[in-house]
Image (cartoon, rainbow, N blue to C red):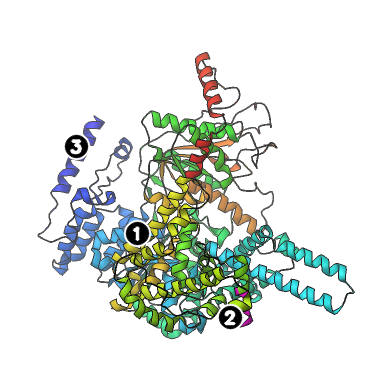
């Protein structure tokens, strides 16, 4: 009977969809359904028995292609029924609560959207509604997302909804990309004339800058100690000890540790206050300590090496900023801090932008930090309508400066009269998964701010209970998870890409990778090195960056001897000393008048480059770019020739980029410097060499793809209705490409987004943090123990607000991981664990967060060895122990098969399997 009802509903829905009137209107979307993205194709809902019995409204998801005709028709109909028709058409694709949010009137609006509630659909529908029905111009809307993937998805959906010409004028991007555009257009108002044509340094670049600054600092201190020894020998032994100690601190390991810690703390300072522009290190730190961000992250525990080395955070901050300025560069944090300073200090720019923007829409608002929150406030002023979407229960980035109070408290204070709506319907997970995840939230401790909790309403049918499984140790944990995955796949129930392993720390992945390789299961570890941060890719991009900004010493030192041209470490030291003697950076010394030289080189290169894509102009007839005193510096002939060739190559590259497409120039450059031979000659396996060269070719392909994109993008409408097409020619287009590359390399999420793009049929292995925004049919969360969840163990005293917030964030992190599961959720914990993978083992207690899962019984703590008297039950009241003696008798044949399987998977990895594991990273 039930099946007959479902069939009848489907047939009626199909008749309704296919008979929708087009009203004679022409839709902007003329693409056949089978060529359109999956998300906009016709979808008939599966009506469950549960939804019929409880009389829930059926969710007839009309495809955007289907209802687009009616929207176009309604916009040309009589004014008396226009609004009513618009609402009716929008509600065909949205649930009741989604429609309430998307079609809300003017005013500030806060949407508390639970996981899997369709907030992206609400955001895009809101943009379409404002443009199509409310008459807003596309460039009067600013849509801010937290990741490049979200921004691309938003643009793709808007293109389908509104057409390419309209969607391309919507100002949509990440906080960093929008901040970057604001600064690049108006940086002269900040008075920092040295960084008008700035580069953007990624994480690796900023770490290198910090290391270089510290190394120079210690070298100068050694020189000071040495000069004091000449003046007097009273404390000669102490001075010699200081010299030795300073040399030790300059060693790579010590520098690496100090640079990493200082860079992290400097980032906390910049992200913890509205802006640090123009402040020295001590002033910026004092401002941070007085802010609310210091409640979550303190700066009291400085690295022991830094304390011994007598380097304060304030000193490190000043050294780091001086090095950035010398390289004419900004880091990611500056892309947030500088635009805030610009809007605060320059009334003309602020008034212009505030009058321009009518609506500001922000996604993932719970993860905003101080400068991001202030940037929205400055852009909105007293005129724009602010529409924010987020979920305080999914705030998991406090450790890097995000402040959940921005959404839970500050928004209501700074935007009085704001309306709050909730998206409660969950389209992703089964009721069992949601009830268990909500039970975990009961571990959140009060911080004095009443949370906006969303009680989720599951729309999926009933599924299996959450399985809480105890295993003997971390090796048994890996065997259990991979064995269950293999079983599910062999049964044909799920593809590999439908399953994911989530863990708290990266160190937990090794054993799972070993088991996956032994069983020949394809997998990918998400969170590896992003494409644009791979060595060979950065080597190529260093040439382009240096051609655009010859003062970029970081790119100069990366490319000057890559490929090798006889300019070794000794020659580089001599060149740096020569430049420093003139009070110049190395880039300023090697390219003293690069703009004038570029013009001269342009004339010489015009004829030669026209011969073909790889016809690099003859450089023998070109004048030298600088006069390096070869004899005075005692440079070899090979080094002198290499310096001359390198400088000519960079200036000629700049000249060619002025007139020709980046892809063709790059192709010629790679051929000219024999980069393929350089890559293939590296000491690595043939497969790895080939992969690296393919990465280099991907750079050329990306440049070619970028050239095919519209010359004017949505972000170009930031402050003008008619952005000039000619402004995007030559070097300006190359600068745009470099900017996009830098923003694609944003920390943390870049690799996860990149590896998810292709959706290969592989098991996904990642940390809980990187799982945010993803979903899988089957999820395994491993290491559910007190030392890992919460990380560092449950605190006995949470009177310190910092400890309280860390505890709550650990609870929210587990909640986020659990709500990634659509059908099955497995939580595993071990009785004992070797934290560092060695022989020393410790007894492990089950995570206290799991006590709140509905249906769980009280448990007795397990001893380090042996069985417990009472076992913890899962929410299905069943418990399986996969290691040691089973709680249920097994047939002899089953036991034998299990032993044989265990012997097979415990065998050491073969060399071929080890290589396969490395390739998956």
| Residue at 44% from the left image edge and 64% from the top image edge | 673
Between residues 842 and 1, which one lies in front from this camera angle?
842
Between residues 642 and 141, which one lies in front from this camera angle?
642
Badge 1 crowding class, 10 Å Cα cut-off, few under 14, some 14 to 19, many 20 or more, is some
Q: How far apart are marks 1 and 3 (CA)?
A: 50 Å
Instruction: Say which quarter of the image contains residue 907.
Output: top right
Q: Earlier in the sequence, mark 2 or mark 3?
A: 3
Say which residue label 3 marks.
Answer: 8
Q: Which range of residues does the magenta coloring cover? A: 575-584
Q: In this view, does 350 lie above or below 461?
A: below
- In the displayed structure image, the side of residue 831 where residue 675 appears, left or right: left
Please name which of the two marks, 2 or 3, marks the residue nearer to the observer: 2
Residue 750 locus on image (x, y percent)? 45, 56
Between residues 805 and 921, which one lies in front from this camera angle?
921
Q: Can residue 259 be seen in this view?
A: yes
Say which residue label 1 marks.
Answer: 701
Badge 3 crowding class, 10 Å Cα cut-off, few under 14, some 14 to 19, many 20 or more, is few
Kindly check if marks 2 and 1 are in contact, taking CB atoms under 8 A apart as contact: no
Residue 238 locus on image (x, y percent)? 85, 68
Q: Is the magenta stretch mostly helix, strand or loop?
A: helix
Residue 166 locus on image (x, y percent)? 25, 68
Number of on-image labels = 3
Quadrant of the image containing the N terminus: top left
Badge 2 crowding class, 10 Å Cα cut-off, few under 14, some 14 to 19, many 20 or more, is some
Say which residue label 2 marks.
Answer: 584
Residue 752 painted magenta: no
| Residue at 35% from the left image edge and 59% from the top image edge | 701
Q: Distance between the residues labelled 2 and 1?
A: 37 Å
Q: Is residue 525 visible?
A: no
Between residues 352 and 627, which one lies in front from this camera angle?
627
């Amino acid at each position: 009977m039930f099946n007959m009802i479902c069939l009848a509903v489907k047939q009626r829905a199909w008749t309704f969809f296919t008979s929708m009137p087009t009203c004679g209107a022409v839709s902007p979307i003329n693409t056949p359904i089978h060529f359109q993205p999956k998300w906009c194709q016709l979808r008939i809902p599966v009506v469950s028995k549960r939804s019929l019995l409880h009389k829930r409204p059926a969710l007839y998801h009309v495809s955007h292609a289907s209802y687009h005709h009616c929207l176009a028709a309604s916009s040309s109909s009589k004014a008396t029924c226009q609004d009513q028709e618009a609402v009716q058409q929008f509600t065909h694709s949205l649930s009741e609560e989604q429609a309430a949010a998307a079609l809300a009137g003017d005013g500030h609006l806060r949407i508390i959207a639970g996981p899997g509630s369709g907030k992206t659909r609400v955001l895009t529908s809101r943009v379409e509604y404002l443009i199509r029905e409310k008459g807003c111009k596309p460039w009067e809307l600013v849509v801010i997302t937290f990741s490049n993937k979200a921004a691309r998805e938003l643009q793709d959906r808007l293109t389908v909804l509104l057409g390419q010409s309209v969607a391309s004028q919507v100002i949509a991007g990440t906080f960093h990309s929008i901040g970057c555009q604001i600064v690049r257009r108006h940086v002269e108002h900040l008075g920092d004339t040295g960084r008008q044509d700035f580069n953007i340094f990624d994480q690796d670049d900023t770490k290198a800058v910090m290391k270089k600054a510290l190394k120079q600092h210690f070298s100068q201190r050694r020189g000071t100690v040495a000069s004091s020894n000449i003046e007097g020998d009273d404390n000669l032994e102490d001075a010699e000890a200081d010299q030795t100690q300073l040399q030790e601190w300059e060693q790579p390991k010590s520098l690496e540790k100090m640079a990493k810690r200082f860079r992290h703390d400097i980032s906390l300072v910049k992200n913890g206050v509205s802006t640090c522009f123009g402040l020295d290190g001590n002033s910026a730190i004092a401002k941070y300590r007085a802010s609310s961000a210091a409640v979550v992250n303190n700066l009291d525990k400085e690295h022991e090496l830094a304390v011994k080395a007598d380097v304060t955070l304030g000193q490190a901050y000043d050294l780091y900023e001086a090095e950035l300025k010398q390289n004419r560069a900004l880091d990611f944090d500056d892309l947030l801090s500088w635009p805030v300073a610009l809007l605060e200090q320059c009334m003309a720019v602020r008034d212009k932008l505030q009058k321009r923007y009518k609506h500001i829409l922000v996604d993932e608002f719970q993860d905003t930090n101080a400068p991001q929150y202030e940037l929205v406030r400055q852009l909105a002023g007293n005129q724009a309508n602010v529409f924010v979407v987020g979920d305080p229960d999914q705030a998991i980035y406090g450790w890097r400066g995000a402040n959940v109070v921005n959404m839970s408290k500050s928004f209501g204070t700074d935007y009085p009269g704001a309306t709050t709506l909730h998206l409660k319907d969950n389209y992703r997970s089964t009721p069992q998964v949601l009830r268990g995840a909500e039970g975990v939230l009961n571990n959140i401790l009060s911080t004095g701010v009443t949370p906006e909790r969303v009680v989720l309403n599951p729309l999926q049918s009933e599924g299996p209970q959450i399985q809480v499984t105890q295993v003997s140790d971390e090796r048994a944990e890996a065997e259990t998870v991979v064995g269950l995955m293999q079983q599910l796949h062999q049964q044909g129930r799920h593809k590999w890409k439908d399953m994911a392993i989530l863990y708290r720390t990266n160190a937990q992945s090794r054993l799972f990778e070993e088991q996956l390789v032994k069983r020949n299961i394809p997998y990918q570890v998400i969170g590896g090195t992003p494409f644009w941060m791979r060595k060979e890719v950065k080597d190529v991009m260093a040439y382009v960056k240096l051609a655009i900004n010859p003062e970029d010493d970081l790119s100069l030192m990366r490319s000057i001897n890559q490929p090798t041209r006889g300019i070794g470490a000794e020659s580089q030291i001599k060149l740096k000393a020569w430049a420093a003697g003139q009070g110049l950076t190395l880039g300023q010394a090697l390219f003293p008048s690069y703009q004038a030289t570029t013009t001269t080189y342009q004339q010489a290169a015009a004829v030669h480059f026209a011969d073909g894509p790889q016809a690099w102009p003859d450089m023998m007839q070109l004048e030298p770019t600088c006069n390096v005193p070869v004899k005075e510096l005692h440079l070899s002939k090979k080094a002198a020739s290499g310096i001359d060739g390198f400088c000519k190559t960079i200036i000629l590259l700049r000249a060619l980029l002025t007139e020709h497409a980046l892809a063709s120039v790059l192709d010629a450059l790679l051929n000219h410097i024999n980069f393929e031979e350089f890559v293939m000659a590296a000491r690595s396996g043939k497969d790895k060499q080939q992969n690296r060269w393919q990465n280099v070719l991907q750079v050329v392909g990306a440049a070619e793809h970028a050239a095919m994109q519209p010359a004017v993008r949505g972000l170009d409408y930031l402050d003008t209705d008619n952005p000039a097409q000619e402004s995007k020619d030559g070097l300006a287009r190359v600068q745009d490409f470099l900017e996009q590359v830098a923003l694609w390399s944003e920390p943390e999420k870049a690799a996860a987004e990149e590896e998810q793009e292709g959706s290969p049929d592989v098991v996904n292995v990642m940390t809980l943090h990187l799982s945010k925004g993803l979903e899988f049919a089957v999820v395994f969360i491993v290491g559910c123990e007190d030392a890992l969840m919460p990380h560092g163990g449950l605190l006995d005293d949470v009177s310190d607000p910092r400890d309280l917030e860390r505890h709550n964030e650990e609870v929210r992190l587990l909640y986020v991981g659990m709500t990634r599961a659509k059908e099955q959720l497995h939580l595993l914990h071990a009785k004992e664990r070797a934290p560092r993978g060695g022989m020393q083992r410790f007894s492990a207690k089950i995570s206290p967060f799991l006590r709140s899962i509905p249906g769980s019984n009280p448990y007795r703590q397990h001893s380090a060895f042996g069985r417990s008297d009472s076992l913890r039950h899962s929410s299905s009241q069943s418990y399986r122990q996969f290691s040691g003696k089973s709680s249920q008798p097994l047939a002899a044949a089953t036991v034998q098969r299990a032993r044989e399987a265990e012997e097979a998977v415990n065998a050491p990895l073969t060399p071929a399997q080890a290589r396969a594991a490395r390739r998956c990273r």
